[in-house]
Image (cartoon, rainbow, N blue to C red):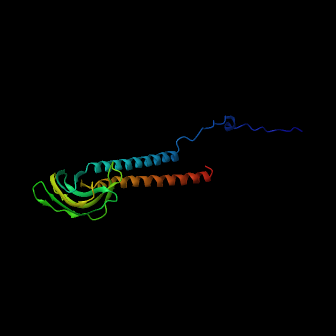
Amino acid sequence: MTTMTRTERPSVRQLLPPPPATVGRGWEPGWIGGLLVLLGIGLAIWWGVATYVGMVDDLQRLRRVQIPSTQVVTLDEGTQILSVENDRLATFSDLRFSVVGPDGASVPVDPYEGDLRYDVPDQPGRVGRAVATFDTGSPGRYSVRVDGRAATGAILAIGEDASRAALPGILGAMTLMAASLVGGAILLGLRLTRWGDGR
């Protein structure tokens, strides 16, 4: 009795050599997202620092006069703030202000409503406190007079509200930082989920 043996021919897939192993996965979307998060955080920090530096520059450019005194200062159009700069614990009282515009007319001066304070640049221990405000209808030379009693070394600073000009930059930097952190948390959560699934 003759026994017949059937030999299967190998398939083409079996004859081909195995593909070479790949090193790494290249630029996955997760890595790109992580780089974008880091870029957003860096931009937010830069934006915040630039805004702070700009605000300090605005404070340094305030016009400053002695108390008491009468000085003529050149001001731009807009709302001007009168602030008293002195030692942090110093007090002042009974200050009176009067302002005359370029046309010789008296400019109304109103008490400042609220609590606006700032650290005087390059003078540790000294703070400025907003006490009054007035509006300049046009740019020009204004005569500012201040009378009253204040601590020795007190200075009257005149100019626009530096914090108001810096507010958009501060809010923008905070929004960008928050969005970057939220995006980073989402990417981290997705990455942990993939690791848990063994991918």
- The spot of residue 146 in percent (x, y) is 19, 58
The extreme right residue here reads 1
Q: Residue at x 56, y 51 (%)?
A: 191
The extreme front residue here reads 152
- The spot of residue 164 in percent (x, y) is 30, 56
- The spot of residue 10 in percent (x, y) is 72, 37
For this rendering, which residue is in front, 144 or 86?
A: 86
Q: Residue at x 45, y 52 (%)?
A: 180
Q: Residue at x 10, y 56 (%)?
A: 104
Q: Residue at x 53, y 52 (%)?
A: 188
For this rendering, which residue is in front, 38 or 117?
A: 117
The extreme left residue here reads 104
**62 displayed left or right of 7:** left
Task: Quadrant for the N terminus, please.
Answer: top right
**43 displayed left or right of 156:** right
Question: Total number of numbered labels?
Answer: 0
Quarter-of-image position of residue 81: bottom left
**41 displayed left or right of 150:** right
Residue 107 versus residue 55 in the image, above or below: below
Quarter-of-image position of residue 155: bottom left
For this rendering, which residue is in front, 87 or 121?
A: 87
